[in-house]
């Protein structure tokens, strides 16, 4: 018996795009098990040798030359990928994209990164007859997301919708869904039970995240945090930066019973539940997950471009501050140490007052609404599962 097939294409430039794809797939699955989702990082899937090399070069550029990344972001801000760029992407990295689509026979394609979005748009222009949804995974609308072949846009905020409308996209094709977060972020777990599970103490706790790539924080900030370990528990989550994790664990200033240095984790939702403050790079996905949990956030050195926009949005919504001086970190550490109740009150208030597009299940619910409106066929089937292996 036929069931609905949703194919989600992403790329690994940062971890947020693919996390968003998996989060949406899991959310759809929870709401309707009769919908079968598949998540693919298309460039890596089609070019398993070349793809990782390109991602490694991009990662190095982001880490060592963030201003260059910001300049490129701004210089191309109002521009879609031109036809020559689309052709180059197709021939060099995505030549077999049409074959993948023909084999998987999706009823709907959702792209969470501009590159596969441009490639699928090109295939649609050449005759591919599959609806294309574009999920913009930041709180900005860069021109590279925009293609005339896109059937529906899924965006983070009403502001991003207005930005797309200024680019002559009709409002009925733009849906304010918010950015999807995995269902494990939809509810808050028991702090006491999770502390026992994670072997953490019941005391004020700060979670410091370097992102999936484990971008480095400066020595002054790390030392300032470590100096407060007697009264504040510190959990450093440094992602896939194994070299940094090893270095920190060997450094005497981090060898304290209240300091925990971790690498990549798939239980960030639990770490957020037992933490009272999050210090992070302001990636769109991490910020949205933090908002889902209501945890106050301090945004560290936003990369010029979309990270700046992300941080400004969440500051304006009352979820955090820019960590732009030692005074900011001192203020929050003192609050945790001496006025813990104020921090907990702020967290609970953030959850109660969040707008609909920041509700953690909102995106999956909106997409399900589009499906049940009859735009995409939903076939009866008792039980299906998401096939893609999850990171």
Image: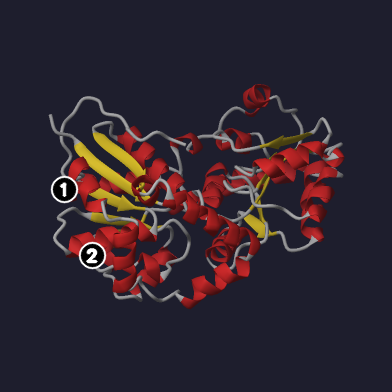
State how the image is colored.
secondary structure
Closer to the camera in the image, 374 or 17: 17
Q: Is residue 116 left or right of residue 255?
A: left
- Which of the 4 image quarters holds residue 252? top right
* Disc 1 from disc 2: Cα separation: 20 Å
Q: What is the x, y in percent for residue 227? A: 87, 44
Q: Earlier in the sequence, mark 1 or mark 2?
A: 2
What residue is shown at x 44% (from left), y 56% (from top)?
A: 137
Residue underneath mark 2: 149
Q: Is residue 34 left or right of residue 323?
A: left
Q: Is residue 121 visible?
A: yes
What residue is shown at x 61% (from left), y 57% (from top)?
A: 318
- Labels 1 & 2 near each other (Cβ < 8 A): no
Q: Residue furthest front?
A: 49
Mark 1 or 2, which is nearer the eye?
2
Q: Is residue 276 visible?
A: no
Q: Dot 2, how many residues are within 10 Å of its Cα: few (below 14), some (14-19), or many (20+)? A: some
Q: Dot 1, how many residues are within 10 Å of its Cα: few (below 14), some (14-19), or many (20+)? A: few
- Which of the 4 image quarters holds residue 88? bottom left
Give SS at disc 2.
loop
Give SS at disc 1.
helix
Give the quadrant of the N terminus.
top left
Residue underneath mark 1: 374
Q: What is the x, y in percent for residue 238? A: 66, 43
Q: What is the x, y in percent for residue 354? A: 51, 51
- Which of the 4 image quarters holds residue 205? top right
Q: Give the tally of numbered discs.
A: 2
């Amino acid at each position: 018996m036929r069931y609905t097939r949703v194919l989600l294409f992403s790329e690994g430039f940062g971890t947020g795009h693919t996390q968003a794809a998996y989060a949406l797939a899991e959310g759809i699955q929870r709401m309707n098990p009769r919908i079968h989702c598949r998540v693919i990082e298309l460039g890596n899937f089609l070019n398993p040798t070349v793809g990782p090399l390109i991602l490694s070069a991009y990662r190095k550029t982001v880490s060592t030359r963030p201003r260059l990344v910001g300049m490129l972001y701004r210089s191309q801000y109002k521009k879609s990928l031109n036809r020559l760029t689309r052709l180059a992407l197709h021939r060099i990295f995505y030549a077999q994209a049409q074959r993948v689509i023909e084999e998987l026979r999706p009823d709907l394609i959702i792209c969470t990164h501009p590159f596969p979005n441009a490639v699928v748009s090109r295939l649609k222009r050449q005759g591919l007859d599959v609806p294309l949804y574009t999920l913009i995974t930041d709180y900005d609308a860069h021109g590279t997301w925009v293609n005339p072949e896109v059937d529906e846009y899924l965006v983070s905020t009403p502001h991003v919708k207005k930005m797309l409308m200024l680019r002559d996209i009709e409002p009925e094709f733009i849906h304010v869904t918010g950015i999807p977060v995995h269902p494990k972020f939809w509810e808050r777990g028991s702090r006491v039970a999770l502390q026992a599970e994670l072997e953490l103490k019941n005391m004020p706790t700060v979670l410091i995240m370097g992102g999936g790539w484990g971008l480095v924080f400066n020595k002054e900030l790390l030392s300032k945090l470590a100096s407060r370990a007697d009264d504040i528990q510190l959990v450093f989550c440094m992602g896939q930066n194994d070299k940094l994790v090893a270095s920190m664990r060997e450094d005497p200033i981090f060898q304290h019973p209240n300091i925990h240095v971790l690498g990549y984790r798939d239980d960030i939702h639990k770490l957020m539940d037992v933490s009272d403050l999050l210090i992070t790079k302001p990636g769109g996905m991490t910020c949205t997950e933090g908002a889902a949990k209501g945890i106050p956030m301090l945004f560290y050195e936003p990369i010029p471009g979309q990270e700046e926009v992300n941080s400004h949005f969440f500051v304006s919504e009352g979820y955090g501050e820019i960590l732009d001086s030692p005074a900011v970190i001192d203020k929050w550490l003192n609050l945790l140490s001496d006025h813990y109740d104020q921090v907990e009150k702020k967290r609970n208030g953030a959850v109660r007052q969040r707008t609909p597009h920041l509700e953690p299940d909102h995106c999956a619910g909106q997409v399900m609404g589009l499906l049940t409106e009859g735009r995409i066929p939903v076939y009866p089937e008792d039980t299906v599962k998401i096939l893609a292996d999850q990171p």
